[in-house]
Structures are given as C-alpha cells and as structure tokens.
Amino acid sequence: MSTRGLPKERSGVVVSDRMQKTVVVSVERTVMHPKYKKYLRRRTKFKCHDESNQCRVGDRVLIVECRPLSRDKRWRVSRVIERARNTELQPSKGADAQAAV
C-alpha cells in the first residue's frame, strides 16, 4: 500500500468566471534572470474547477492540483482567501445630464 505525495497548492486571483463550474485563476511568481540577477514577475493562468460557482472576478483563491477533470482543468478551488471589493460602475454625472435632455 503506497501513499500519495502532497498535491501542489497555488494562490492566485480569479480573472474570469464566465464558464459554468470553471474559473480562470492567474498565479504570479518571481523568477531571477540568469544573467542580470533581477527578479521578474511571471504569470500563469490555470483553469480550475469551482463546484458551487462561488468565485467572482477579483477574488483571491487557493487552488489545489487534482486529477484531470477535462481537457484543460487539472486544478480545483480549495477555498476563497479574500473576496473582491465591490467595484460596480457608478453612472457619471455627464451621462445623467445627457439622458435628461
């Protein structure tokens, strides 16, 4: 009887929630340039399974590696770390003035 290794975990921000039970999460990491020794930011997008459709754009989530769920999905959302701030668009005063005329 063998034991499995620990699954990989990543923390990222939800950038798309338009699919059913799937979110796209952008994970950022830093990599040192081999010649110039400067740290560079690299981003990777993962499609993750969100069973309850609870994630929204801007949420910070923890994702965990899992078995392949579809052609692109190999990760699932473990938990929501931080909810996105409510950024609804407010109509500008100029738009109200034009609508009234």
Image (cartoon, grey):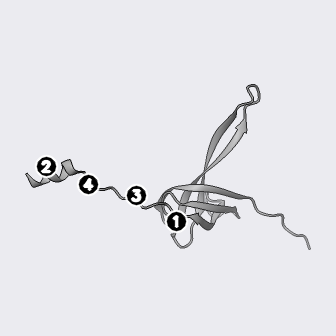
Contact (Cβ within 8 Å) of mark 1 with mark 4:
no
- The residue tagged 3 is 87
Q: Are marks 3 and 2 in contact (CB under 8 Å)?
A: no
Residue 66 locus on image (x, y percent)? 70, 64
The three-letter code of the residue at mark 2 reads Gln
Residue 18's quadrant in the figure? bottom left
Residue labelled with disc 2: 98
Q: CA distance from mark 3 to mark 2?
A: 24 Å
Mark 1 or mark 4, earlier in chain = 1
Closer to the chain start, of discs 3 and 2, is 3
- Name the residue carrying label 4: 91
For label 1, the residue is 55
Real-space CA distance between mark 4 and mark 3, rounded to the nearest whole angstrom: 12 Å
Picture coordinates of residue 13, whole percent (x, y): 56, 55
Give amino acid for label 1.
Answer: Cys
Marks 1,3: beta carbons within 8 A: no
